[in-house]
Amino acid sequence: MNRTLRVWLIITSREHDVLKFLNKRFSQFEEQHNINIELKLITWNRAFETLIEAYKNNNSPDIIQIGTTWVRTLAYMGYIEKIPQDFETRTSFVENMNQICIYRGDQYAVPWNVDTIVLATRTDYLKTLGIKKRDLDSWEKFYQVCETITEKRRSDPDLPEALAFSLRAEADLLHRFAAILWSKGGEFADFYQIPEKILTEEKVMENISYLADLMQTSDIKASDLDKHPYQLNNEFYRQGSYVFYIGSWYGIIEDISHNSFESENGNYNYTILPFPSADGTKSQTYGGGSVLAVSSRSEHKQKAWKLIELFLQDDFINEWIRVTGKVPAFEVDFWQKRDVDQRINTMYQQSINSKTYPAHPAWATIEKILSTAVAHSIWELIDNNNTEINEETFKLLKKADQNIRDLLKLSWEMKNYE
């Protein structure tokens, strides 16, 4: 009998440190449970496709880390196993993450990591530029602040640029776009129907125009459009090139865990602000993360769930945060520090109030269509110094809508798959 437990985890950085940590923990597990562990690290960009290909080729892993929007799709296809009745999962403090793990009344995955789109900044820059937090509680005010920073840079080019915002045609761009759309009171169409308008819906197009305008106001040029998010991370956190950053909270967690960017006087400069809203009141941002599941084709289901139990233990999680910069979707020591660290408290509150995409069976493909169309429409406007949706941009958005409608018609028989 095959004595190997195959584990696929999604890692985006620090691969050497991750492997060192996991090999140590896995060796202990292997000895205790008389099994070998074969680890494969994959990236978000190809994770879903790689997993589906593995199932098609009868080469699927035993344990998989998956995105929250994939759970019900994989459960519907019969690719992942129900959680055993005696398995002690850890409930997430983010309710939509608990719900996303449920399919037709049964739980198929366990919450693991949580992530949201945040607005990060440096407190020393805010002080130098005379910016108050109340100046940033709505998107209209945020636009005005970025405009003022850009104007000041014309006479003082040594000042940092206003905004770091990745516009690559990837899923992360859609996360940022959706976060701003939702926080301004907008919504995507109901994908469980076959909507006439999706990206051509009025509020969605207004959001595209707003972002194209914000990018140009922040002096983001066509040459900046393909900057990788990690490059912007580095320029914001390590080079201090920008006042604001909209994206993942990875750098903030690294700062909390390692004091990586601590100022000379011992006070942290990098912080998170509450996400702006339409009118300065309660806001919502995008909330995602990942969960753990066991393949329905695993020959070692019992030991696979035992290994997942290890992944959920406090001592494992505390080290995992330090090594990867990923934080758990459930209560641990890290989140208990929210009473004394405003950054952690903001992260916690934003996670609780976050929204996520619909758990539609075709979401992986829908997400690609949306990401590409949003990116190309913003690129087109910036490249032509436009801020309003023109005929060319509208055609692009309308074509994406049609592609999604065609896809929804193909998956119509799965509309009641929940």
Image (cartoon, rainbow, N blue to C red):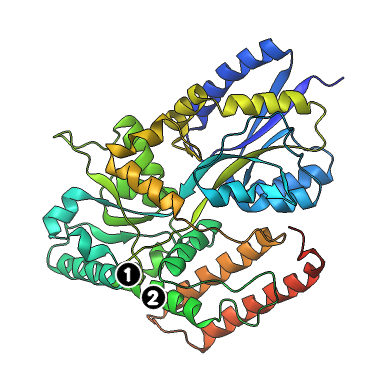
Furthest-right residue in view?
1
- Who comes first in sequence, dot 2 or dot 1? 1
Quarter the N terminus occupies: top right
How far across and down, in percent of the image, does residue 92 sit?
53, 41
Residue at 49% across / 38% down in the picture?
13
Residue lying at 22% horizontally and 39% vertically, measured from the top left: 268
Q: Is residue 124 left or right of residue 12?
A: left
Percent from the top left, x then y, of residue 297? Answer: 82, 36
Q: Which mark is residue 210?
A: 2
Left or right: residue 177 versus residue 213 is right
Image-based side of 54 in relation to 388, left or right: right
- Amino acid, disc 2: Tyr
The label shown at residue 72 is none
Residue 269 to residue 395: above or below: above
For disc 1, the neighbor class at 10 Å (few under 14, some 14 to 19, many from 20) is many
Quadrant location, the C terminus: bottom right
Marks counted in the figure total 2
Q: Which mark is residue 139?
A: 1
Task: Mark 2 and mark 1 in contact? Answer it, CB < 8 Å.
Answer: yes
Instruction: Kindly give the residue lying farthest to the top in the view shown.
Output: 31
| Amino acid tagged 1 | Trp
From the viewer's side, name the closer residue of 191 and 268: 191
